Image: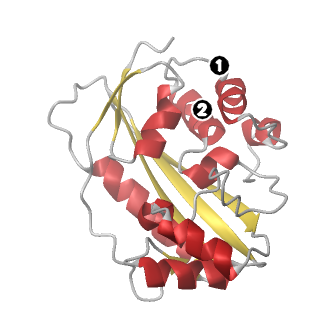
């Protein structure tokens, strides 16, 4: 079990749920940063910058030995970043635009220790199934899309939006645990050595790439 105190620089319930599986001493505090995309900024550069800025926000209650974790997730279709929908009509349009197409989900993680900060990014190709307009309307009416980038949750069993996914399921949810583990190993932070097993057990998902992630490949 980890001996460090960890802080999640976010109020995301999904990220907190994923980290809770690790049985850490964990607290959360949102980091408020300007998430406006800069002119000409590439999607990957944008998500990495936002994660780094989030982890750099001071947490007054954190001790000098505490570990701060921040993440940012974006859905990218043809270099257009799809954020959280502002209303039901926008959610419908996002889902209709993603239907039967492939896009990318980028999750950047930044970890700040006592002396250094390390950033990693997981880039996952995601193919959406050919769902109907009626299915979109039902899903939007459920309210689930409204707080999610791209207006969908990969883990929503009722809508089941994704077709034949073979990447990092946890990353699309907002926190790729294997990428987090390899950051913590680089930093020499004491932590359990079974992130992939914990992740797969809780998600009921057989991950085909975790070993390659742990070997240092840029794969999501």
Callout 1–callout 2 Cβ contact below 8 Å: yes
Mark 1 and mark 2 lie on one chain; the one further toward the N terminus is 2
Up-down: is 177 above or below 65?
A: below
Measured Cα–Cα span from mark 1 to mark 2: 8 Å
Name the residue rendered at 26%, 41% in the picture: 29
Up-down: is 79 above or below 162?
A: below
Crowd class of label 2 (few under 14; some 14 to 19; many from 20; radius 10 Å): many
Res 78 seen here: no
Front one among 26 and 203 = 203
Q: Which residue is at the far bottom? A: 39
Up-down: is 106 above or below 188?
A: below
Residue 131 position within the rendered picture, expressed as x and y whole percent measured from the top left: 74, 74
Residue 134 position within the rendered picture, expressed as x and y whole percent measured from the top left: 66, 77
Front one among 102 and 35 = 102
Figure label count: 2
- SS label for mark 2: helix
- Read off the residue under disc 1: 193
Snapshot colouring: secondary structure
- SS label for mark 1: loop
Q: Which residue is at the far left? A: 60
- Residue 136 is drawn in which quadrant? bottom right
- Read off the residue under disc 2: 181
């Amino acid at each position: 079990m980890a001996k460090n105190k960890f802080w999640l620089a976010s109020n995301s319930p999904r990220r907190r749920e994923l980290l809770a599986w690790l049985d850490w001493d964990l607290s959360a505090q949102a980091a408020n940063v300007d998430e406006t995309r800069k002119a000409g900024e590439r999607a990957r550069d944008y998500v990495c910058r936002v994660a780094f800025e989030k982890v750099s926000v001071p947490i007054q209650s954190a001790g000098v030995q505490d570990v701060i974790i921040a993440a940012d997730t974006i859905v990218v279709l043809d270099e257009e970043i799809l954020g959280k929908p502002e209303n039901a009509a926008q959610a419908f349009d996002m889902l209709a635009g993603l239907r039967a197409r492939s896009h990318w989900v980028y999750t950047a993680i930044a970890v700040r220790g006592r002396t250094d900060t390390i950033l990693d990014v997981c880039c996952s190709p995601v193919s959406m199934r050919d769902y109907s307009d009626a299915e979109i309307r039902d899903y939007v009416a459920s309210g689930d899309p409204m707080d999610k980038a791209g207006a969908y949750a990969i883990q929503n069993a009722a809508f089941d939006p994704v077709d034949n996914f073979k990447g990092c399921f946890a990353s699309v949810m907002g926190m790729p645990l294997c990428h987090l583990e390899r950051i913590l190993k680089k930093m020499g932070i004491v932590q359990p050595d079974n992130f992939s097993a914990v992740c797969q057990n809780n998600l009921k998902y057989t991950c085909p790439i975790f070993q390659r992630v742990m070997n240092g490949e840029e794969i999501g």
